[in-house]
Structure formats: structure tokens, C-alpha cells
Image: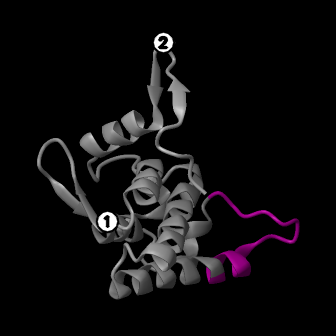
Amino acid sequence: MALPLESAIVLSDGQKSTLQSVCDDVQANFTRAGEIYWDAIALALYKAPAKKFENRFGDVFTFDDIAYELVNRKPSDSSCCGTHRLISLAILLRISTERQILSPACELAVRDELGLTASILARTQTSNGYWRSNWYDDLPDAN
């Protein structure tokens, strides 16, 4: 469950604001480059059921655009050994099951990616319960 957009926040400089202003800023400055994992989650939580949004540069993004971007990123290019990418995909899929922000084809692509990853993780988990930091080397097209 997401916090209400009216929730008060205090910024690092002591300035008071609301969660709405943070979400507006995330939307205004969104691009598909870089670390978009947490931005994608925030936008999906607070923009759904809208399927698209526009940044301040006039670029329009759909949640399909974001999900496909994440599906196509190599885990080796993602923070924390690829886990931020997986968390974002799982949450986008979860939100979509309730609020239909992804097309059926995109949902299938996300499910396939998460399913493939789960099967590789199940197969490569060590007897001590951990995974190597380069677990993704066992994915097709890993390199």
C-alpha cells in the first residue's frame, strides 16, 4: 500500500513538502537512462491506472516502455547484481494485475523474464543458500 500523496515530508535541507511534489519531480525528470528502478515503481504506484505519462521535455512514456526497457537490460548492468531490476519488474507486474498498466504482451514478457530468472536461481543456488554475484552468467545472452 502506497502512502497518500498528501503525506508531509521534510527534505534534507529542512524544507517541508509533500509526497506529491516528489512524485511530480520524478515524472518531470524521468528518462529511460540510468537507475530507473525506484522511479519506475513510484510512477507505477502513483500514476496507475494511467498507462502513460509525460515528462517536462514532452517525452511520453508508457509502462510497457519501462517494463520492456527493464526486461532488455542485462542484469550485469543493474545495481546489486541485478536484483533492483528484478524487484522493479515484479512490482510493475503486481501493480498491473490490479490496475492493468501493462499490455497483455508486456505482462507475458515480464512473466517470462521473471520465470526464467527464477529457474536459473533455483538451479544455481549454493548448498549454503546463497548465489554467486554473477549468477546471471547462466542466463541466455548473458554476455
> Percent from the top left, x then y, of residue 108?
43, 87
Name the residue furthest top: 13
Name the residue furthest front: 6
Name the residue furthest left: 58
Q: Which element is circle 1 on?
A: loop
Q: Quadrant of residue 116?
A: bottom right
Q: Nearer the viewer, residue 41 or 140?
A: 41
Question: In the image, which disc is placed on residue 101?
Answer: none
Cα separation between marks 2 and 1: 33 Å
Q: Main secondary structure of the magenta part?
A: loop
Of the numbered discs 2 and 1, the one sitting upstream in the chain is: 2
Is 121 contained in the magenta span? yes
* Residue under label 2: 13
Amino acid type, label 1: Ala
* Residue under label 1: 50
Q: Nearer the viewer, residue 86 or 120?
A: 86
> Percent from the top left, x then y, of residue 46?
42, 54
Task: Answer few, some or many: residues within 10 Å of disc 1's Cα (few below 14, many 20 plus, some between 14 and 19).
Answer: some
Residue occupying the point 57% across, 83% down? 115
Residue occupying the point 48% across, 49% down? 38
Amino acid type, label 2: Asp
Contact (Cβ within 8 Å) of mark 2 with mark 1: no
Q: Which element is circle 2 on?
A: loop
Task: Report the side of 113 relative to 100 (left or right).
Answer: right
- From the image, which quarter does the C terminus lie in? bottom left
The residue stretch that appears in magenta: 119-133
Is 123 contained in the magenta span? yes
Model colouring: one colour
> Percent from the top left, x then y, of residue 96?
45, 74
> Percent from the top left, x then y, of residue 131?
72, 64
